[in-house]
Image: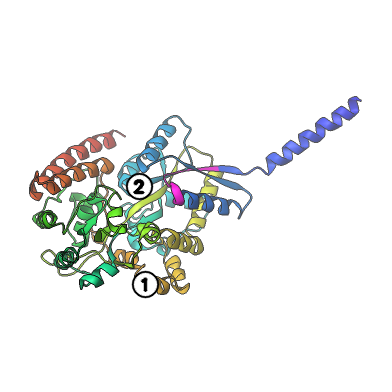
Amino acid sequence: MKSTILKIALAGALVSLASGAFAKEEIHWWHAMGGDHGKRVNKIAADFNATQSDYEVVPVFKGSYTETMTAAIAAFRAKEHPHIVQVEGGGTATMISAKAAVYPMEQLMKDAGEHFDKADYLPAVISFYQTTDGELMSMPFNSSTPVLWYNKDALDAAGAAVPTTWDEVKSASQKLVDNGMKCGFSFGFPSWVMVENFTAWHNLGMGTQENGFAGFDTEFTFNNSQLAARLDDIAAMSKDNLFVFGGRASASLPLFTNGECGMWMNSSAYYPSISGQAEFAFGQAMLPLDTAVASAPQNSIIGGATLWALKGHEAKDYKGVAQFMTYLSSPELQAWWHQETGYVPITTAAYELSKSQGYYDNNPGIDIAIKQLSLNTPTPNSRGTRFGNFVQIREVINEELEAIWSGQKTAQEALDAAVERGNVILRRFERAATIN
């Protein structure tokens, strides 16, 4: 009897050891992608997990971008943090300053012995997340840029062409309203679209120190007369409903998809939402040029988020992180993600694959975002923005822009106030970063 019990116990122990030997190392990924995007994130993780037997990526939705980053910071302090966290572009400077917490992605790939070539990535995408020395700090994931969405049926009915300049936006809006539309145009994410991208598109600086890329001791300079003149003109257009302000973020999307406004400026990543809601023919065009400011456009800048690796885990775990990053960057995965979501592909190979699959032939104009980002080699003014606590500063800019639309301030007054208030936040961040 004792012999039988011993054999059973030994067999159980062997089974336990065997199952433990084949257990996958878990790689925890905290993200901010809800809804359909969340389902796609789960699919990406499941598909990667099926390709190998060593690691299991576990995606966890943590709420908004701000909530996700806040949760990751708190978890790091408690030493209960994930391996990977998704952070929006506005949080890049904050993450870079947290040297004790961040494992630079390029260094991680090298340490893990995983092949990595920066030349494979679209320059306009990858440059946003590099140091001034060229080191990649995080892996691009969901990258987008604002475009001009237009209601083709409405423009045709009004006898208006798709605008390429701000003067043409105004004339097209007038024709749309005269033909019965409730408004000519609107836009979302006001700071991103009308300040950050307007300045980049016209090769104007947002701030000193190469828009913050060259150091934390930067100051804002976007309170220039060119931007002020454009914003004042937009405010004037609101009197005749040529322009209607619909709120922050994507709150103004229904104005476009419901057929109230004929044009809308916002992220290229709204393709799934627009195609699923609009009952009219629509298209994408490049952002309009202000010919009083520049003779030709420079390039737009990206939004969205990247994936950051956090220190504090075992070396074997980071080999799994590196393998997952290689999988995420594969042409097949990136082409699928691009076509499913409207985000731009992060690699040239994924762009070329989408071409060869006939995606752009079947969806004319859908590659506008890629062309816009790659229009010219980025300059210090058009590479992007890297300001500390920029998520908070964007809210300040949005508040001041809303004072323009409501008639409480002129554009110059609002921009001056935004710069002054923003610089206070920058100095607070600089002090904290110096202490760290």
Q: Which amino acid type is marked by label 2?
A: Glu
Q: Position of residue 402 (x, y in %)?
A: 17, 45
Measuring from the top left, give residue 371's x and y in whole percent: 32, 68
Q: Please give the name of the residue rendered at 40% of the width and 59% of the height, measured from the top-left corner.
A: 276
Q: Is residue 290 visible?
A: no
Instruction: Say above or below: 88 vs 377.
Output: above
Of tags 2 and 1, the one toward the viewer is 1
The numbered mark, 2 or 1, whose residue comes first in the sequence reads 2
Q: Magenta segment: does it hold 348?
A: no
Residue 150 appears in which quarter of the rendering? bottom left
Q: Indicate the position of residue 201 as horizontal and vertical percent values.
A: 21, 62
Q: Which residue is mark 1?
A: 364
Q: Which mark is residue 88?
A: 2
Q: Which residues are magenta?
A: 27-37
Where on the picture, by quarter, is residue 261?
bottom left
CB within 8 Å, label 2 to label 1: no
Most extreme residue toward the right is 1
The residue at the point 11 percent across, 45 percent down is 414
Residue 32 belongs to the span the image colors magenta: yes
Give the label on residue 209, or none.
none
Q: Is residue 392 left or right of residue 177?
A: right
- Give the SS element for disc 2: strand
Please report the residue visible at 21 percent of the width from the left and 70 percent of the height from the top: 158
The crowding category of the residue bearing disc 2, from other C-alpha atoms within 10 Å (few below 14, some 14 to 19, many at least 20), is: many
